[in-house]
Every structure is written in structure tokens, then in C-alpha cells.
Image (tube, grey):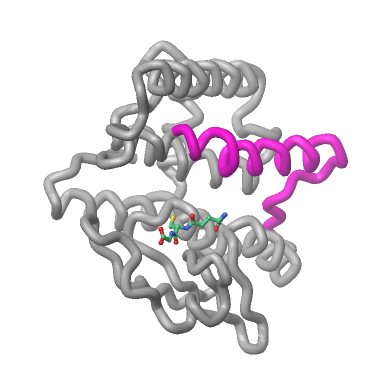
Amino acid sequence: MRLYSGPVSMFSAKAEIAAIEKNIDVAVEFVPFNLATLYAPKHPDVERINPKQEVPVLIDGAVEIYDSTQIFEYLEDLAPQPALWPETLEARALARRLEMESDEFFFPDVIRFMPGRGSKLNNNEIEDAKARLRAYYAATNNILSDRHYLAGSFSYADIAFYAAEFFARFIGVGPKNDLPHLQSWRTRMSQRASVKLVMGKMTDYLGSFGIKAEL
Ligand SMILES: N[C@@H](CCC(=O)N[C@@H](CS)C(=O)NCC(=O)O)C(=O)O
């Protein structure tokens, strides 16, 4: 199995963490990337397989897929144990909802603050995005007030939000230190071997450019 990834691709990190959690051997290959020109030139396999020309892209024999959430589903079908969607219908629905919201609602606001992008926002847009992020952190802290993981058992929802929140923190729009359940959850997550390995690589990469990131 080959996973095309990028050294600061949080979507690819999601896929790699999930594969490790499932004890699936995966060869991770970084596509051309640098902090100035980003993802250029495109890797030929990424160009061929993903019409959006984004990583992650996964090849497993005849299977060629892209998109971190699609990859989650494939890994779950391939290696059902340990299960990374919760057991009950309700908890599974919640995990899927939170996984989607992290990718499609939370992260797009985070990425607005990437250096080079923020300058395109006017003051109102910046304040609105910051308010949405604060609300998201508070809501997540509430969810975690009676459980160790977002949908009860450790799931893809946790992997997705950890990767996105890591990104938010290193670009300076992470949560304040007044959300204890969120903080405990992060500590719990950062102690997982999969997270240490994958996010540790990203931390080292960023550190080599003087950018401080922390698990
Ligand atoms: N919805 C996609 C998003 C993937 C995505 O945005 N990938 C970024 C890197 S994290 C990318 O490859 N961008 C290519 C580009 O900016 O040219 C997923 O979940 O995999």
C-alpha cells in the first residue's frame, strides 16, 4: 500500500494515523512540496488519480482512491479491527458528523489564517472566523465533558480533529488554555503512538524552518 502525502498535509496525516492504528503497513511518499510554492509540481500519480490534484492519494493494488475520509472508509473495510467507527448507530452517526465538520467547517476557517492568506481577509472576516473558531472549541470542550473521545470510543472523528487542531495551534489560532476537557483530550491523543509518529514528523519538518509546533 502506498500513500501519497505531504510534509504538512493534515489530511494526509489523518490517513497515515488511521493506517498505523489499524496496523496496516503503508509506504508513505511525500509529493513535491515546499512552503513557498506549496504542491508543485504535481506528482504524476496524484495528477492521474485525483481530479482535484490533492493529497492524500492511496494505492493498494488495483485500488486507487483519494480524499482522507474515503481512505478512512477503505481502511475500515480492509481491516475492521480495531474498529475506528464506534459501535452503536448513534455514536457512529455522531463520529461521522464530527469528522466531516472538522474537515469542512472547522479547518476551512483555520486555513484562512495561514500566512499569505490572512492578508486577503478584511477585519470583519477575520473577527467572524475567529468567533466561529472560538465557538467550535467551546462546543468541542462541551462534548468532551463526559467522555474521553469525541464520539465515545476513539474514532476517526478524533483523528480528524486532532490533525486540524494541531494545524490551528501552530499557525496561532488554537484554543485558549481555558477549556480543560479539550486540553485533556489533546494530551490523551498526543500520547498515542500513531499520533506521536505522524505529527512528530510534521513537527520536525516545521521545526527545520524555525516554525514551532507542538503535539
Ligand atoms: N478533502 C480532501 C482535502 C485534501 C487537501 O486539501 N489536500 C491538500 C494538502 S492538505 C492538497 O493536496 N492541496 C493541493 C494544493 O494546494 O495544490 C481530503 O480530505 O483529503
- Seen at 60% across and 18% down, the residue is 139
Q: Is residue 158 visible?
A: no
- Seen at 65% across and 43% down, the residue is 100
Q: Which residues are magenta?
A: 82-109
- Work out whether residue 187 or residue 179 is closer to the camera in this orientation and state it: 179
- Seen at 28% across and 33% down, the residue is 119
91 lies above or below 206: above
- Work out whether residue 82 or residue 167 is closer to the camera in this orientation and state it: 167
Q: Position of residue 59 (x, y in %)?
A: 57, 80
**Residue farthest to the bottom, as pictured:** 61
- Work out whether residue 194 or residue 70 is closer to the camera in this orientation and state it: 70
Residue 23 lies in the magenta-colored region: no
Q: Position of residue 82 (x, y in %)?
A: 68, 58
Which SS type dominates the magenta stretch? Answer: helix
- Assign the C terminus to one quadrant of the image: top left
- Assign the N terminus to one quadrant of the image: bottom right
Q: Is 35 on the left or on the right of 156, as rendered?
A: left
- Seen at 30% across and 60% down, the residue is 38
Q: Is residue 153 visible?
A: yes
Q: Quadrant of residue 143?
A: top right
Q: Position of residue 9 (x, y in %)?
A: 40, 56
Q: Position of residue 12 (x, y in %)?
A: 47, 60
